[in-house]
Amino acid sequence: MADISMTWYFILIQSFVIVILIALIFYYSRKLSDSEFKKRSQSTLYGKISEQFLPFMKTYPYESKSFRFLGSPIDGVQFEEDKIILIEFKSAGGKLSKRQREIRDLVAQHKVVFQEIKIN
């Protein structure tokens, strides 16, 4: 009888330990996921801030005074005497979003227009 109650006691202890370990795994995986999200979010924020300063860098190939920042869906527009350039700043590993690729394709298809709208 004592052997049976000791067996149940050990099973109960092992079950309790397993439940605690599973709870710890879920807790730390959630914390890891949250910290990865915060890191990506912070990286995006730094990217948006730095985009506003890039036209003033020495390596920027155009006159920075002629750049107008938009932010979304493209970073900005560069106005030159002989052309207008839609600018999107990307880091080395950055890729265009679906919307940015659509805009690029519209420009390539010459589907960009100038429209004057008069307000009465």
Image (tube, helix red, strand yellow):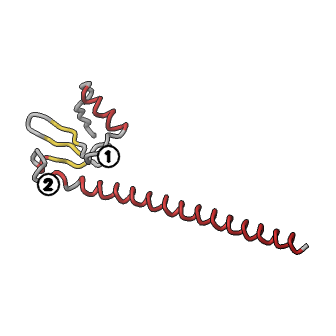
Which residue appears farthest toward the top when viewing the image?
Answer: 109
In which quadrant will I find the C terminus?
Answer: top left
Whole-angstrom CA distance, mark 2 to mark 1, is 19 Å
Amino acid type, label 2: Phe
Q: Residue 4's image quarter?
A: bottom right
Which one is nearer the viewer's eye here, 40 or 48?
40
> Residue at position x 24%, y 46% from top?
89
Check residue 96 in the rendering and tell me which mark sits there, or answer none.
none
> Residue at position x 49%, y 58% from top?
33
Residue 88's spot in the image, x, y percent?
25, 43
Which residue appears farthest toward the right when viewing the image?
Answer: 1
Tag 2 and tag 1, C-beta contact below 8 Å:
no
> Residue at position x 25%, y 37% from top?
118
Which one is nearer the viewer's eye here, 118 or 51?
51
In which quadrant will I find the N terminus?
Answer: bottom right
Q: Is residue 29 left or right of residue 113?
A: right
Residue 100's spot in the image, x, y percent?
32, 38
Amino acid type, label 1: Ser
Q: Which residue is under mark 1?
A: 72
Q: Which residue is under mark 2?
A: 56
Residue 41's spot in the image, x, y percent?
39, 57
Which one is nearer the viewer's eye here, 3 or 14?
3
Number of numbered callouts drawn: 2
Which one is nearer the viewer's eye here, 27 or 34?
27
Counting other residues with Cα less than 10 Å from the Cα at mark 2, is it few (<14), some (14-19), or many (20 or more)?
A: some
- 86 up-or-down from 36: above or below: above
> Residue at position x 42%, y 60% from top?
38
State the SS at label 1: loop
